[in-house]
Amino acid sequence: MADILVIGEQRRGVLSPVVAETVSVAKELAAAKGGKVLVAILASKPSDFTPQLSLAGVDEIIEVALASEEFQSDLFEATVLKLIEERKPGVVLLPHSIDSLGYAPSLVVKGNFGFATDVFGISYDGDDLVATRQAYQEKVRAEVDFPGKSTVLLTVRAGSFKPPEETASPSVTSFAAPAAEAHTRHIAFHDPEASGGVDLTAAEYILSIGRGVGEEDNVGQFEELAGTIGFTLGCSRPIADSGWLPKYRQVGQSGKTVSSCKVYIAMGISGSVQHLAGMKHVPNIIAINKDPEASIFSAARYGVVGDMFEVAKELKAQLG
Ligand code: FAD
């Protein structure tokens, strides 16, 4: 059976957490249909990432040294295309990211590969690969298959798979990147917003509020509560979009993934897939929602069907 190739991504020397998550699903696919799991890391010093990529399920790490320190789309496109031509994988998995969106579409056109983006489920139906993604403005789940394609390229949504916990000792090889004409160049990173010292990705205890908070004037009391009980305040996207809290406090697909969180209190948050993408891996999720049918309860370890203002008052009285 053909191999599965995972493309590693890094930024400013930090490996994207989606790479390890993607290894998990690659491992499942290999277990189902055979083939080896290959992980290619494209970076100026790829060997820096080899220890982190030596995960259970990885058979081979392919180090690809690039001239460019940071992501460069023409270089990635040419290199991944050459890798696919030489190694002939059946499935190629990329993190779904701003970087992969910069080169994956033109790559699949050049290679005539099957393609689906922002995938959060991958399986086989008989011998056919099936990718699950959302469609119609996230209203429905679509199962996509790829008739007649011997190579399929998928970009994988962050937070969809649990990374392997165990390490391994895969073989390490190197691959020469082809020469490619670069039409863009990296100049500098601009952080859109100073984070005021708040780093949700490092916070262990987070209290997040959603649209259930009602209006901007109500936000302050939850900020105060979070401070009182020693939690970092987070929020769902509508709260950040309204400007009630800064963007760096947003949890979810287009916000932060709360990688270090141990306890996550979700108040007045419905539990959309986009929000869950940033927090559903947290071992202790406590959901407070007045709607007993809210999806957040399916991800929660503990749930309170009730009014978030009442619960906040009680929490403050008990713990404040
Ligand atoms: P709602 O869905 O409106 O839910 C509010 C909840 O509050 C309801 O369940 C209600 O029962 C409850 N409630 C109301 N009053 C009370 C009360 N007094 N006490 C208790 N409960 C109460 N969303 C994110 O959060 N993060 C993202 O990163 C993100 N990225 C996205 C990316 C894309 C491409 C798209 C299309 C969407 C994205 N979204 C994201 C938006 C997402 O689809 C949802 O719209 C959003 O998560 C809903 O936020 P919410 O749960 O706060 O609001």
Image (cartoon, rainbow, N blue to C red):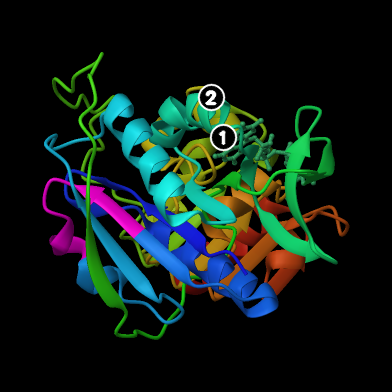
Q: Is residue 96 magenta?
A: no
What is the distance, in whole Å, between disc 2 and disc 1 at their CAs? 6 Å
Q: Quadrant of ligand 1?
A: top right
Q: Quadrant of residue 228?
A: bottom left
* Marker disc for residue 19: none
* Residue drawn at x 77%, y 64% as measured from the top left: 124
Residue 281 visible to the viewer: no
Q: Which residue is mark 2?
A: 241
The range drawn in magenta is: 40-49
Seen in the picture, residue 179 relative to 227 is either above or below; the reply is above
Q: Position of residue 47 (x, y in %)?
A: 15, 63
* Front residue of 165 and 44: 44
The residue furthest top is 183
Q: Secondary structure at mark 1?
A: helix
Q: Secondary structure at mark 2?
A: helix
Cβ–Cβ below 8 Å for labels 2 and 1?
Answer: yes
Q: Position of residue 168 (x, y in %)?
A: 34, 85
Quadrant where the image shows the C terminus: bottom left
| Mark 2 residue CB less than 8 A from any atom of ligand 1 | no
